[in-house]
Image (spheres, rainbow, N blue to C red):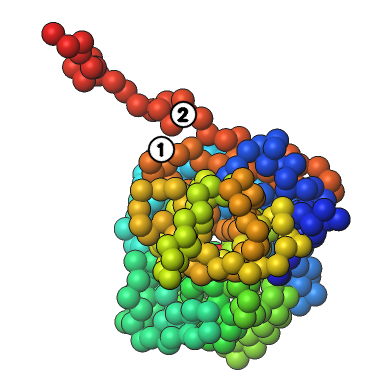
């Protein structure tokens, strides 16, 4: 069994994370429970920052908050000196609630509303990552109404799409995000931005995919982005001072996953940007990355209580837990795979093959298929699913009106609740019952 970060097994054969026995966490906070290994999150943040310090003079690491965000996480990110990538008014509001330095916020999104842009301007967000010429015009108008110039990076598509082991190099990228370099569309958008009095273009952005193991796609994207920056300079005289190469670095979910690590990514990007800039006679831009998953995924563990164990002879054994697709949609959404263990029986032989399912009213509510667990697993045991720190809590739903689980940060033997468990009252809190829909007494 692979243990991430500070996870360990204690003398009682139970899982501990951050020096805390998960059985104690279950008693105190209940299950399902998202447990975040704070030390590992901090180590991952530092891996990015320190590698940059070694390899490149001017940089910024913007944590992609879509992977996992709550007020405490925004606080941690600020403490570690990272910036924040947000994509919605809700993420901006969370950053504000945490007291995050808003000039270190990058505001993304392919369809920002006027209200969100106004909120971002009001909050003093540092950069808008603009996704279309329509958005440029809107931003120019709204910043103008405030008598300001909004700093912006233009999101372009370099025609590189990367997935785990392959990257696909496409001439014309079919994507809802960004403006294609191919066909001169991105150049035209840059020209438009440069003509706007209330937009201050600082550079360009791209993001080539997610759960990427192989760095080749990043190198190619860096080369294309610098060639594009050179073309813009040639055509307009504008020299980009900032270049963001997005996020997407992969993590280990299951045995056999062997992603490159942040230090390797940064060394690769720094090298590619240096050589690209030299080849085109461009000054070194500030280099920005936006890691999400690689900061938080491996730091998260979801703890469940085992309920019904249903054996269908000759077919399959279904082991039900008290959560499921509402707290982890990734297996149903894109066949994501995870590893698990019976957290209070780590010393037992793993001789029973089960399919772990949730309690949602969907046959597709399957968390893990045909995995080995402790032979003596029984109702009431604790099941830990590992590497659930990214795109689990942030994608949680209220399907079937099961409340969203709480989140605890554990470190050095202590556990701090950072998101409390949702209550039934929270869930019904936005409901309105018009008088005409009130149940009537039988006449
Ligand atoms: C623009 C952008 N930046 C960063 C990220 C973070 O990616 P990851 O969590 O894979 O690092 C994403 C993810 O979708 C993204 O779209």
Residue for badge 1: 401
Is residue 207 placed above or below 425 in the rendered structure?
below
Q: CA distance from mark 1 to mark 2?
A: 8 Å
Horizontal placement of 43 versus 315: left or right?
right
Residue lying at the far bottom of the rendered structure: 279
Q: Are marks 1 and 2 in contact (CB under 8 Å)?
A: yes
Give the residue drawn at x 68%, y 51%: 36
Is residue 143 placed above or below 315 in the rendered structure?
above
* Res. 434 mark: none
- Image-quadrant location for residue 299: bottom right
Q: Residues within 10 Å of mark 1 (few under 14, many from 20)?
A: few
* Res. 424 mark: 2
Horizontal placement of 290 versus 439: left or right?
right
Is residue 234 placed above or below 247 in the rendered structure?
below
Q: Closest to the observer: 280 or 352? A: 352
Q: Residues within 10 Å of mark 2 (few under 14, many from 20)?
A: few
Q: Closest to the observer: 231 or 76? A: 76
x and y percentages locating residue 249 in the rendered image:
59, 72
Give the residue drawn at x 20%, y 13%: 440
SS category of the residue bearing label 1 = helix
Give the residue drawn at x 29%, y 20%: 433
x and y percentages locating residue 315 in the rendered image:
41, 69
x and y percentages locating residue 419 in the rendered image:
61, 38
Give the residue drawn at x 67%, y 83%: 268
Work out whether residue 286 can be spotted: no
């Amino acid at each position: 069994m692979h243990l991430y970060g500070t996870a360990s097994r204690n003398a009682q054969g139970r899982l501990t994370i951050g020096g805390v026995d998960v059985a104690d966490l279950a008693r105190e906070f209940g299950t399902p429970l998202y447990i975040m290994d704070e030390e590992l999150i901090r180590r991952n943040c530092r891996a990015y920052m320190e590698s940059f310090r070694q390899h490149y003079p001017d940089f910024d690491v913007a944590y992609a908050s879509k992977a996992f965000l709550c007020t405490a996480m925004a606080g941690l990110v600020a403490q570690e000196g990272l910036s924040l990538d947000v994509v919605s008014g809700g993420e901006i509001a969370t950053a504000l609630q945490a007291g995050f330095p808003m000039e270190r916020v990058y505001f993304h999104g392919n369809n920002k509303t006027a209200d969100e842009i106004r909120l971002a301007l009001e909050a003093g967000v540092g950069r808008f990552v603009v996704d279309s010429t329509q958005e440029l015009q809107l931003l120019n108008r709204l910043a103008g109404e405030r008598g300001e110039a909004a700093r912006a990076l233009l999101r372009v598509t370099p025609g590189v799409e990367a997935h785990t082991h392959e990257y696909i190099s496409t001439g014309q990228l079919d994507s809802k995000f960004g403006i294609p370099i191919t066909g001169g569309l991105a150049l035209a958008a840059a020209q438009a931005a440069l003509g706007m009095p209330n937009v201050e273009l600082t550079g360009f952005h791209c993001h080539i995919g997610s759960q990427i193991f192989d760095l080749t796609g990043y190198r190619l994207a860096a080369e294309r982005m610098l060639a594009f920056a050179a073309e813009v300079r040639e055509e307009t005289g504008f020299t980009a001072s900032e270049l963001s190469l997005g996020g997407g670095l992969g993590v280990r979910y299951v045995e056999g996953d062997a992603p490159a690590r942040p230090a390797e990514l940064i060394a690769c990007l720094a090298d590619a940007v240096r050589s690209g800039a030299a080849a085109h006679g461009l000054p070194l831009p500030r280099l920005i990355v936006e890691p999400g998953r690689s900061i938080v995924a491996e730091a998260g563990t979801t703890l469940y209580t085992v309920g019904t164990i249903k054996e269908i002879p000759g077919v399959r054994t279904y082991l039900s837990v008290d959560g499921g697709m509402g707290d982890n949609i990734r297996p149903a959404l894109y066949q994501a795979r995870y590893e698990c263990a019976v957290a209070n029986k780590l010393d037992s032989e793993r001789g029973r093959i089960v399919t772990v399912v949730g309690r949602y009213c969907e046959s597709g509510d399957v968390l893990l298929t045909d995995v080995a667990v402790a032979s003596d697993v029984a109702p009431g045991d604790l099941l830990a699913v590992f590497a659930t720190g990214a795109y689990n809590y942030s994608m949680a739903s209220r399907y079937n009106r099961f409340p969203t689980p709480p989140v605890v940060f554990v470190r050095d033997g202590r556990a701090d609740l950072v998101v409390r468990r949702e209550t039934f009252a929270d869930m019904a809190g936005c409901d309105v019952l018009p008088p005409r829909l009130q149940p009537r007494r039988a006449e």
